[in-house]
Amino acid sequence: MRLLPEYLLLVVALGALRGVLFPVGSTLLTGTGIVVGVVLLAVAGTLLPIPTGAEIAVVAALLAVGVSAPLAAALLITLPALSLPSLLMVRGVFPRGLLVAVTGLVVGVGVLTSVVALGV
């Protein structure tokens, strides 16, 4: 029960920032800015709490409004894998270095997926 207030606060804060985290129509998401956009969306996708399976609807909606396939690919991988609330909930059990490494790996795999999607 102790984690419930933290979780609710994080979910509300991340939801309030969704326009900043997912800037649909932004110049970051086109041309040379796609590299920055991929990294930002991979980080945002890693931190947002999305139930497994819901990432498909999120990605489909973003594709429908014109987000490029590489950006959508990053989110498809990172959204269900990890979230900031889940990291905070297990921070007392796992070493900090392990949590940082897992977070970095999820972001890295999201970016790598985007690179592969660019080549397809």
Image: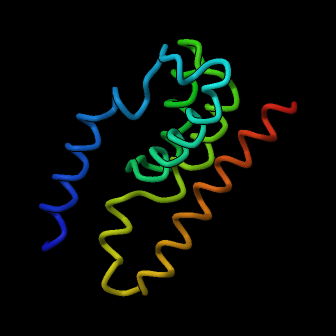
Which is more toward the observer, 104 or 31?
31
Estimate the x, y position of residue 64 in percent, counting from the top left.
57, 14
Q: Residue at x 39, y 48 (%)?
A: 48
Q: Residue at x 31, y 85 (%)?
A: 92
Left or right of residue 14: residue 31: right
Estimate the x, y position of residue 68 in percent, counting from the top left.
65, 22
Q: How was this image coloured?
A: rainbow
The C terminus lies in quadrant: top right
- In the figure, 35 relative to 111: above or below? above
Q: Residue at x 81, y 41 (%)?
A: 116
Q: Which residue extends farthest front?
A: 32
- In the figure, 69 relative to 104: above or below? above
Q: Which residue extends farthest right?
A: 120
Q: Residue at x 48, y 52 (%)?
A: 46
Callout count: 0
- In the figure, 64 relative to 106: above or below? above
- In the figure, 5 relative to 71: above or below? below
Estimate the x, y position of residue 62 in percent, counting from the top left.
53, 22
Left or right of residue 70: residue 60: left
Which is more toward the observer, 54 or 48?
48
The N terminus lies in quadrant: bottom left
